[in-house]
């Protein structure tokens, strides 16, 4: 399949760049919310509320644009590759001798020409796109959420069980988590 993907390298690169942009923009939303919540304690003004609201809407619109572009580009490439592979299979089937068709059932050949190629398209398009997006987002969430705190189990003798206590992480523990 790599040979069929080669003509579409630039489009795939643009699609993967859109995936990276979508993940980064989506992960920026919680930072805006954090700033807004922090400003609640410091005294928020109407202008700041409008700024945070506009920032959230702008980030959502930008993420939507890049999500549309990533799907359009990557799924478009998967459809183009499916078309190319389908044409290659059809050309090969036309070249085969009549004895081949007497040995193989027509239903099997049609199944490979339709269902199998559809599975390849789904793996190349949505499958690769969503796996890439999920792997980037999960790593990004770990970075956004890891704010210097950790949960440690502590035994509470009054309750007779362990509870999780949130404590500031030490420098040694932070270095070890990298």
Image (tube, rainbow, N blue to C red):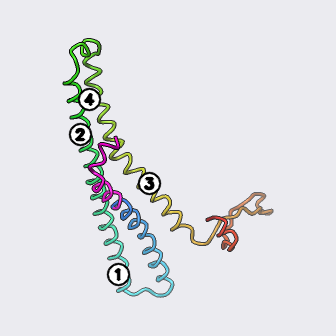
Write down the residue under mark 4.
113
- How crowded pointer 2 is (Cα within 10 Å; few <14, some 14-19, many 20+) is rated as some
Q: Which residue is drawn at the image coordinates 66% and 71% (left, top)?
A: 169
Q: Which part of the image, by quadrant, shows the C terminus?
A: bottom right
- Per the model, the C-alpha gap separating discs 1 and 4 is 54 Å
Task: Indicate which disc, 1 or 4, sits on the residue closer to the N terminus.
Answer: 1
- In the drawing, does residue 66 fall left or right of residue 143? left
> Residue 27: x, y in percent?
43, 66
Q: Would you identify the image quadrant in which residue 83 lies?
A: top left
Q: Nearer the viewer, mark 4 or mark 2?
A: 2
- Per the model, the C-alpha gap separating discs 2 and 1 is 49 Å
Write down the residue under mark 3.
134
> Residue 135: x, y in percent?
46, 55
Whether the residues at callouts 1 and 4 have beta carbons within 8 Å, the answer is no
Task: Indicate which disc, 4 or 2, sits on the residue closer to the N terminus.
Answer: 2
Span highlighted in magenta in the image: 1-17
Q: Secondary structure at mark 3?
A: helix
Front residue (pair 21, 81): 81
Q: Which residue is drawn at the image coordinates 36% and 72% (left, top)?
A: 56
- Per the model, the C-alpha gap separating discs 3 and 2 is 28 Å
Q: Which label number is shown at residue 51?
A: 1
- Per the model, the C-alpha gap separating discs 4 and 2 is 12 Å
125 versus 51 height, above or below: above
> Residue 149: x, y in percent?
62, 70
Q: Which label number is shown at residue 84?
A: 2
Q: Main structural element of the magenta stretch: helix, strand or loop?
A: helix
- In the drawing, does residue 53 fall left or right of residue 38? left
Task: Indicate which disc, 4 or 3, sits on the residue closer to the N terminus.
Answer: 4
Is 12 magenta? The answer is: yes
162 versus 120 height, above or below: below
Is 72 magenta? The answer is: no
């Amino acid at each position: 399949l790599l040979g069929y993907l080669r003509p579409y390298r630039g489009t795939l690169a643009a699609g993967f760049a859109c995936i990276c942009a979508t993940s980064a923009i989506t992960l920026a939303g919680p930072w805006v919310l954090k700033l807004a919540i922090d400003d609640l304690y410091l005294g928020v003004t109407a202008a700041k509320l409008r700024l945070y609201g506009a920032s959230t809407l702008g980030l959502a619109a930008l993420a939507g644009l890049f999500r549309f572009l990533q799907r359009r580009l990557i799924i478009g490439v998967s459809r183009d590759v499916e078309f190319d592979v389908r044409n290659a299979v059809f050309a090969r089937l036309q070249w085969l001798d009549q004895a081949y068709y007497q040995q193989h059932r027509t239903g099997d050949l049609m199944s490979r020409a339709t269902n199998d190629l559809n599975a390849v398209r789904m793996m190349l398009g949505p499958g690769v796109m969503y796996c890439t997006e999920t792997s980037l987002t999960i790593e990004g969430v770990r970075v956004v959420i890891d704010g210097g705190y950790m949960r440690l189990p502590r035994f509470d003798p009054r309750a007779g069980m362990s509870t999780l206590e949130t404590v500031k992480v030490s420098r040694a523990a932070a270095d070890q988590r990298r």
